[in-house]
């Protein structure tokens, strides 16, 4: 089963995207407890797209597709936008062993995403960013 939603690249649509994924997961009879880390990952990725994909004052669209692999108990979520090409996986992970005052700003959110999902991939095709995550539940 695969569903998708398209929203404007505005933070106010984050609850709609989370609700969409939760509804899709509930239809597949996935537990609510398994949705908590998924919601956090969605929030991180979605807000990064809103903040960084488009120039200030430009509102684009974000398409989020959700696919449940019932036999494998796996969820795949793909975020697509037509903003600036940007692969967050090419960025160096922040050094979390440094004291807080010596750390550079940024990168912690994508690090959390990488740690909480089983697979994450990025492609840029036909003028669109595609960030795909998979998580076994």
Image (tube, grey):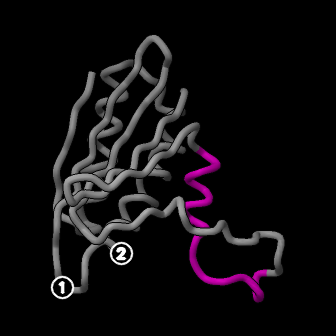
Please tell me whether the stretch drawn in magenta is mainly helix, strand or loop: helix
Q: x, y percentage for residue 100?
A: 76, 81
- What is the quadrant of the N terminus in the image? top left
Please tell me which residue is depicted at 21% across the width and 60% down the height of the picture: 127
User: What numbered label is drawn on residue 52?
Assistant: 2
Which badge, 2 or 1, is on the more N-terminal residue? 2
Q: x, y percentage for residue 90?
A: 54, 63
Label 1 neighbour load within 10 Å: few <14, some 14-19, many 20+:
few
Label 2 neighbour load within 10 Å: few <14, some 14-19, many 20+:
few
Please tell me which residue is depicted at 55% across the width and 53% down the height of the picture: 113
Using the numbered discs, state the Cα–Cα distance from disc 2 to disc 1 in whole angstroms: 12 Å
User: Which residue has dot 1 on it?
Assistant: 57
Is residue 103 within the magenta segment?
A: yes
Residues rendered magenta in the picture: 100-116
- What is the quadrant of the C terminus in the image? top right
Q: x, y percentage for residue 32?
A: 47, 31
Check the image and name the residue furthest to the top.
71
Please tell me which residue is depicted at 44% across the width and 23% down the height of the picture: 30
Q: x, y percentage for residue 76?
A: 40, 34
Q: Are marks 2 and 1 in contact (CB under 8 Å)?
A: no
Left or right of 16 on screen, residue 95: right
Residue situated in front as seen by the camera: 24 or 86 = 86
| Rendering quarter of residue 117 | top right
User: What numbered label is drawn on residue 110?
Assistant: none
30 up-or-down from 62: above or below: above
| Rendering quarter of residue 50 | bottom left
């Amino acid at each position: 089963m695969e569903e998708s939603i398209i929203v404007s690249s505005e933070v106010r649509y984050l609850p709609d995207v989370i609700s969409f994924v939760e509804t899709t997961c509930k239809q597949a009879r996935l537990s609510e407890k398994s949705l908590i880390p998924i919601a956090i990952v969605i929030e991180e990725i979605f807000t990064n797209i809103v903040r960084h994909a488009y120039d200030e004052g430009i509102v684009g669209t974000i398409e989020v597709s959700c696919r449940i692999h019932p036999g494998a108990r796996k969820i795949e979520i793909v975020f697509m936008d037509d903003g600036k090409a940007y692969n967050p996986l090419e960025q160096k992970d922040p050094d979390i062993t440094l004291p807080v005052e010596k750390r550079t700003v940024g990168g912690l959110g994508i690090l959390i995403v990488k740690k909480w999902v089983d697979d994450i991939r990025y492609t840029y095709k036909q003028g669109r960013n595609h960030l795909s995550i998979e998580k076994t539940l």
